Image: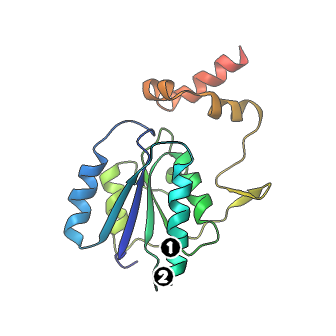
Amino acid sequence: MPLPAQIHIIINPAAGSPEPILTYLNQLLSPTGVDWKVTVTRQPGEVYSIARQMVEQASLVEQASPGVLAIYGGDGSVMEAASALHGSAVPLAILPGGTANVMAKELEIPMDTPEAIRVLLCSEAHIKKIDMGLVNGDPFLIRVNLGILADMITETSDEMKDRWGQWAYGITAVHHES
């Protein structure tokens, strides 16, 4: 894949553990000449609306390449962005910044943030089309969880994820069953 002309990075600062994402982006993107922009979210659901705006702008401009939308966050952030991009020509790049990063792991994206950025800029990288499922008209990636698995995801607090990482999900499941 040739170097993208434009990259819009959405950063979800509530996801995962703190790290100097802006420093990494500046160090790795600035020397490339790529036109890049960062938007930081402040509330749930904002990833979707920002990504949706990018899709609408890309369709209005009718560019040969609509640029790339990159999401720095966890699986929830990736899901919001993918839902907004569903059916569009805008490609999504994942910069794993969450707790579990299941989608990034499935796609073999490096968990190390600078390495993931380097993959985005690598000429050997390629865009991979991924199927999305629909439930009640809403697109999703990976899986649909029910019962204890769904509770495990929705009931695990940010504080637990910060303290225990991926183990927080299992701890929540055990407490839920008690």
Q: Position of residue 175 (x, y in %)?
A: 65, 17
Q: Position of residue 79 (x, y in %)?
A: 59, 52
Q: Position of residue 19 (x, y in %)?
A: 31, 41
Which disc number belongs to residue 21? none
Judge by depth and name the residue closer to the eye, 57 or 162.
57
User: Within 10 Å of the Cα at label 2, are there few (<14), some (14-19), or many (20+) other Cα atoms?
Assistant: few
In this picture, residue 177 sits left or right of residue 121: right
Above or below residue 4? Residue 25 is: above
Q: Residue at x 45, y 40 (%)?
A: 15
Q: Residue at x 57, y 47 (%)?
A: 45
Q: Secondary structure at mark 2?
A: helix
Q: Secondary structure at mark 1?
A: helix
Residue type (three-letter) at the residue carrying disc 1:
Gln
Q: Which residue is mark 1?
A: 57
In this picture, residue 178 sits left or right of residue 120: right
Residue type (three-letter) at the residue carrying disc 2:
Val
Which quadrant of the rendered structure holds the N terminus? bottom left
In this picture, residue 173 sits left or right of residue 6: right
Q: Which residue is mark 2?
A: 61
Residue contact between numbered discs 1 and 2, judged by CB atoms under 8 Å? yes
Q: Position of residue 35 (x, y in %)?
A: 30, 71
Q: Hey, which residue is sitting farthest top in the picture? A: 178
Q: Residue at x 51, y 32 (%)?
A: 166
Cα distance in 3D space between marks 1 and 2: 6 Å
